[in-house]
Amino acid sequence: MLTLKLIKEEKDLIIKRLAIKNFDATQIINDVIALDDKRKNTQQEVDNKQAEMNSLSKEIGKLFKDKKIEEANKIKGQTSSIKEEISQLNKELSDAQENLHKLLIQIPNIPNEIVTPGKGEEDNVILKTIDTKIAMEDKLPHWDLAKKYDIIDFELGVKISGAGFPVYKGKGAQLQRALINFFLAENSKAGYLEIQPPYVVNEDSGYGTGQLPDKEGQMYHMQLDNLYLIPTAEVPVTNIYRDVILKEDELPVKNTAYSACFRREAGSYGKDVRGLNRLHQFDKVEIVQITKPEDSYETLKTMVNHVEQIVVKLGLPYRVLQLCGGDTSFTSALTYDFEVFSAAQEKWLEVSSVSNFESYQANRLKLRYKGKNDKKPQLAHTLNGSALALPRIMAAILENNQTEKGIKVPEVLVPFTGFEYIN
RNA sequence: GGAGAGAUGGCAGAGUGGUCGAAUGCGGUGGUCUUGAAAACCAUUGUACUGCAAGGUACCGGGGGUUCGAAUCCCUCUCUCUCCGCCA
């Protein structure tokens, strides 16, 4: 969430920028400011009353010690009315705080100034298209290839779990594992510390990265233990740093993690769910960075370059998009998407999303850092990106690399698979 | 699943109703000493809100209660640990 300080100081700018995200913030920001004033006044009153109370109590303590019981009792008489006032004010205060918080979490992150207006996907800015695809005839979509080579079984997944839970078999499973290892190796080489996080998180963690309370429906919830299956490794990895004050020299933090990801995808049944395009369970390797505010945009660039170089190594046709306001997520200030071209479907598939959240997540997480000479800790910036999400990469490899000898495994993966063709 | 113990500052660990934001040790930071380092010694060392500042207020797992006053007493929730059982 945004900081109150910023909202107060940059009210007009925030309203203007949020319009790019098609969010009219005028009303809510006015409410926030009014409510905060109330909060502040009430706090002040409570503090004063409390101070009065404290000094009376101290006095009583002294009198008791000196055995001046009567005098003590006299003062005691004064306290009950103050006590009542305090409890009344405290109630007002906590109401104000609660309401304020409710409002604050409804305000999206401010898009960076370079983010262009737009409604959705169709308005995203294509920064670059690298089309390395080879013309081929009789291309099969990956779901047919999966069957032909018996490497992914969708029906079996339906039997065991339901739609969206494919079963990978043989070379399909091995290719999957090779991709995970390749991505982790690339990320480690680039200085990211590998993490194996839990796949299940508690409520606090869900809240910390913003899935809760609003997007509750997107996660699988285990009621008995009140735990959630992670929709991305971002959730457990970023929450490592919840309520943490890092030392300046610990920055930047660079973590990478493979995890299975679980998404309910409620309401997204329809045309784009065929095959591997949209799943309830899928594999992803994530990169996360925590930086000083002044470094975060430079870091975003390096993360984008890093992801690009992985895609290039796989030899897939790809393009890079800068998301427009309408497509930039609630918590993000600036997002770049990577899409690979899937030859048979003749569709671009999103395989990575790299975002700078600035201090928006950090504020929720209470993730701060402190320089050696700083008096106060300040909010860090968080960034993350997929490097990369597996299923669509898998789909693109299958569809783009069809040859008479079978599916040609990208060269960089051969050391990880141990075979060159799926046939 | 059964039985028990516990949750205090970066860590360890005192504190069972008043002067406790909290002893002490370790760690961190600054300094003295030293050619340098170590050792020793001295000082300092949490977070948030509020205020120009001095200061005020809150925080000893969370919530509630008793009391003039709670880290300390009561209720409740959560979590952690130990032992037994089961088990990858």
Image: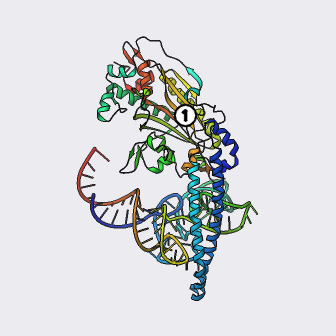
- Reply above or below: A400 against B27: above
Q: Position of residue A331 (x, y in %)?
A: 56, 41
Residue A384 appears in the picture as rendered: yes
Residue A246 appears in the picture as rendered: no
Residue drawn at (60%, 85%), measured in percent from left and top? A74
Disc 1 chain ID: A
Mark 1: few/some/many CA within 10 Å (<14, 14-19, 20+): many
Res A52 → quadrant: bottom right
- Reply above or below: B28 against A46: above
Q: Pick whichever, A156 or A415, lies toward us.
A: A156
Q: Pick whichever, A76 or A234, lies toward us.
A: A76
- Considering the numbered disc 1 on the image, is that residue within a helix, a strand or a loop? strand
Q: Quadrant of the C terminus of chain A?
A: top left
Q: Position of residue A155 (x, y in %)?
A: 31, 28
- Reply above or below: A98 against A421: below
Tally of marks = 1
Residue drawn at (59%, 75%), measured in percent from left and top? A81
Residue that lies at the very extreme toward the top in this rendered image = A137
- Is residue A324 toward the left or the right of residue A272 in the image? right
Q: Position of residue A383 (x, y in %)?
A: 56, 39
Residue drawn at (37%, 32%), measured in percent from left and top? A164
- Could you tell me the amino acid type at mark 1? Val
**Colour basis:** rainbow
Q: Position of residue B57 (x, y in %)?
A: 61, 67
Q: Which residue is mark 1?
A: A354
Q: Pick whichever, B82 or B79, lies toward us.
A: B79
Res B29 → quadrant: bottom right
